[in-house]
């Protein structure tokens, strides 16, 4: 159901914009990682880019379809640097979402009885916690000049839950079945 309150609507627009930028940023940084000889870090960026696409799509669905052009101001890290710097930028962004953005957005949606937005913010918050950890793991290794040791990465197509090696029988965040997970 579409959002009713202006405040939650604003937050959905901002979150949609932020996730859209994150999606593209990670695809670009994935290409940089590949060129620098870190194919697994590149794959991690691509997997998480997909998770951010899932979040953006969820937020987008909750926004009312108006024909008016809407301006949104959103922060983010712009441009390609070295992978070691890109990973630090990714961690900074994910931690901002985990520590400030999504908790505030979630509580606003709860206060305004916006069930759809609340769900969408909750899904994103839970995934971003994992993203911050995975990027930190990659950064620690890349700092030593090595690629991350990585088998498969699985992403839930409903909530963006991201997990290494094997998908769980059911997504711990949204309950989606193992067979639906997307493998990278
Ligand atoms: Fe993320
Ligand atoms: Fe899920």
Image (cartoon, rainbow, N blue to C red):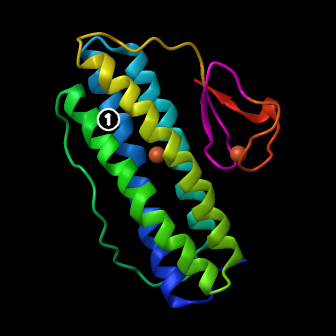
Between 100 and 120, the one lying in front of the other is: 100
Between 155 and 140, the one lying in front of the other is: 140
Q: Residue at x 40, y 80 (%)?
A: 69
What secondary structure characterizes most of the magenta part? loop
Left or right relative to 145: residue 160: right
Residue 181 coordinates in the image, percent (x, y): 71, 33
Q: Residue at x 45, y 27 (%)?
A: 44
Residue named by callout 1: 28
Between 27 and 5, the one lying in front of the other is: 5
Left or right relative to 145: residue 159: right
Residue 178 within the magenta-colored segment of the rendering: no
Q: Quadrant of the N terminus?
A: bottom right
Q: Residue at x 65, y 49 (%)?
A: 159
Q: Quadrant of the C terminus?
A: top right
Left or right relative to 163: residue 14: left
Residue 107 coordinates in the image, percent (x, y): 55, 76
The part of the chain drawn in magenta is 154-167
131 in relation to 122, above or below? above
Q: Residues within 10 Å of mark 1 (few under 14, many from 20)?
A: some
Residue 183 coordinates in the image, percent (x, y): 64, 25
Disc 1 secondary structure class: helix
Left or right relative to 184: residue 131: left
Can residue 127 be seen here? The reply is yes
Can residue 65 be seen here? The reply is no
How many numbered marks appear? 1
Residue 15 coordinates in the image, percent (x, y): 46, 65
């Amino acid at each position: 159901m579409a959002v009713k309150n202006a405040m939650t609507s604003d937050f959905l627009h901002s979150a949609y914009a932020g996730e859209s930028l994150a999606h593209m940023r990670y695809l670009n940084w994935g290409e940089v990682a590949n060129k620098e000889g870190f194919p697994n870090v590149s794959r991690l960026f691509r997997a998480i880019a997909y998770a951010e696409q899932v979040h953006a799509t969820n937020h987008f669905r909750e926004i009312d379809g108006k024909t008016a052009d809407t301006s949104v101001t959103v922060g983010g890290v712009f441009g390609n640097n070295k992978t070691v710097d890109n990973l630090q930028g990714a961690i900074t962004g994910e931690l901002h979402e985990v520590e400030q953005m999504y908790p505030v957005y979630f509580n606003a949606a709860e206060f305004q009885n916006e069930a759809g937005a609340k769900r969408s913010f909750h899904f994103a918050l839970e995934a971003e916690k994992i993203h911050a950890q995975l990027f930190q793991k990659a950064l620690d290794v890349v700092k030593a000049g090595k690629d991350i040791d990585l088998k498969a990465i699985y992403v839930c197509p409903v909530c963006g839950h991201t997990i290494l090696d094997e998908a769980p029988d059911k997504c711990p965040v949204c309950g989606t079945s193992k067979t639906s997970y997307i493998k990278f």
